Amino acid sequence: MADKASLTIGDKNFDYPVMSGSVGPDVIDIRKLYGQTDVFTYDPGFTSTASCQSQITYIDGDAGILLHRGYPIDQLAEQSNFMEVSYLLLNGELPGSDELEQFTRTITRHTMLHEQLATFYRGFRRDAHPMAIMCGVVGALSAFYHDSTDITDPRQRMIASHRLIAKMPTIAAMAYKYSVGQPFLYPQNDLSYTGNFLRMTFGVPAEPYEVNPIIEKAMDRIFILHADHEQNASTSTVRLAGSSGANPFACIAAGIACLWGPAHGGANEAALNMLREIGRPERIPEYIARAKDKDDPFRLMGFGHRVYKNFDPRAKVMQQTATEVLDDLGISDPVLDTARELAEIALKDDYFIEKKLYPNVDFYSGVILSAIGFPTTMFTALFALARTVGWVAQWNEMIADPEQKIGRPRQLYTGPTQRDYVPVGKR
Ligand code: SDX
């Protein structure tokens, strides 16, 4: 690739350096463009814009490749666990056994919430969406953990990161318990990260809770599949919030708010609701037609992706996990048959082939989560739980980046040019 890009504006020529990463597209460094040319670039949705340099996650959308610190997602899903992947995302290397044990112990010991935070839940209606609760409670953490809000102190940044990773399962489980009117369960330190979450969610004080190893492994793998994904909308939100110097708890609350949208993390809830609405394979053609109809706002939820123009590698692992979990649990859910049939038909349809639309991470996840016993309203909260490690890893990387400055995009202004105020009696 060339080492510079030339731009001609009118009768003037401008050269900009081309930068190369370790893999993937080169970038044109246009940081001096406005100062030299008085023009902005225009890229709504940032489809052609690299917002930062990062060493955490690499996606090749055409090849359907996803690497976390260089390790393929299918290998991590198959051979690793969420605590180990969390360490990898945060620190850049897979941990040795002592490092993993130390990290897991640290996370385990941060799983309890300040007791007063439990009163926050009682301020919500019982039918509050868990994501509304997550936004509120996670943002409120900054009112309780003042000793880890100084972002200039690497030690405080790491404590806040550990607290967020550790407390998200507790916060999410409490949101579920509150919605079903059951008492909160405290974390139990002799359980795994994922086992502890399952017990806090589905256990009751009235009897012991046995963690089902099949469900524990499936849930842990689902957490791995959702852990990080480059500069997606919610991660970019966390980075932008962090660029102003906001405390980590406020930044993650902003990421949760962005993830909630049905075009992003909210798609897992929307996808299962869509599959249930379709109900039977015979109704699939009707929904395929609606998804293709430009005049119909309906989109096939769990399908398509800004970056993947091939199979989302996470969707492949998720589909295989859905089959395994339902078989192991002896559950036959017609929704999985509908999902498979829908994917098969769509992938043969010219519209989806031409627009390179494939199932994404959200297409099959709901089938598994439903089989485990989660209501659809909890699906995006689970996505937020898992993505927190990616958000804090990207936030730490941004804070430590010497090139980092407050994010402040410009615009193409198309509004009224200057005009004088007219008093109301003269309008
Ligand atoms: C996540 O960014 C990430 O990395 C996100 C994520 C992560 O881990 O953080 O991977 C998680 O958010 C996955 C995506 C979940 N969202 C959904 O499943 C909702 C349904 N999908 C669409 O809304 C859509 O595909 C998006 C939002 C995911 C991507 O939107 P884009 O970038 O606008 O899609 P595109 O430009 O590739 O679309 C190309 C064409 C368009 O038609 P034209 O304007 O060219 O005529 O395909 C159409 C789109 O209208 N299209 C769809 C479609 N997705 C795109 N048509 C029908 N059904 C769909 N699902």
Image (cartoon, rainbow, N blue to C red):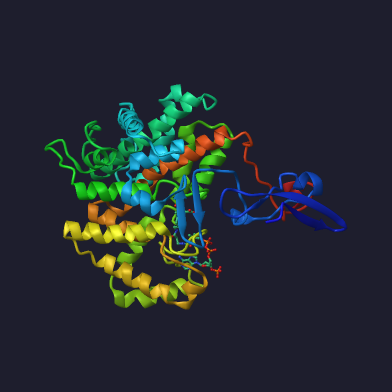
Which residue, as the protein is rendered here, is positioned at the far top? 147
Q: Nearer the viewer, residue 124 or 245?
A: 245
Q: Report if residue 144 is visible in the image.
A: yes
Which residue, as the protein is rendered here, is positioned at the far left? 207
Say which residue appears at 64% left-offset and 36% top-offset: 403
- Which quadrant, please, contains the N terminus? bottom right
Task: Tell me where residue 123 sits by quadrant.
Answer: top left
Q: Nearer the viewer, residue 217 or 382?
A: 217
Q: Position of residue 365 (x, y in %)?
A: 33, 56
Which residue, as the protein is rendered here, is positioned at the far front? 96
Say which residue appears at 62% left-offset and 56% top-offset: 48
In this rendering, is residue 297 above or below 247? below
The mark tally for this picture is 0
In this rendering, is residue 65 above or below 201? below
Q: Nearer the viewer, residue 404 or 275?
A: 404
Which residue, as the protein is rendered here, is positioned at the far right? 11
Q: Position of residue 140 (x, y in %)?
A: 42, 32
Q: Is residue 247 left or right of residue 87?
A: right
Q: Report if residue 278 is visible in the image.
A: no
Q: Position of residue 419 (x, y in %)?
A: 79, 49
Say which residue appears at 28% left-offset and 56% top-offset: 368
Task: Tell me where residue 287 sits by quadrant.
Answer: bottom left
Q: Position of residue 322 (x, y in %)?
A: 28, 59
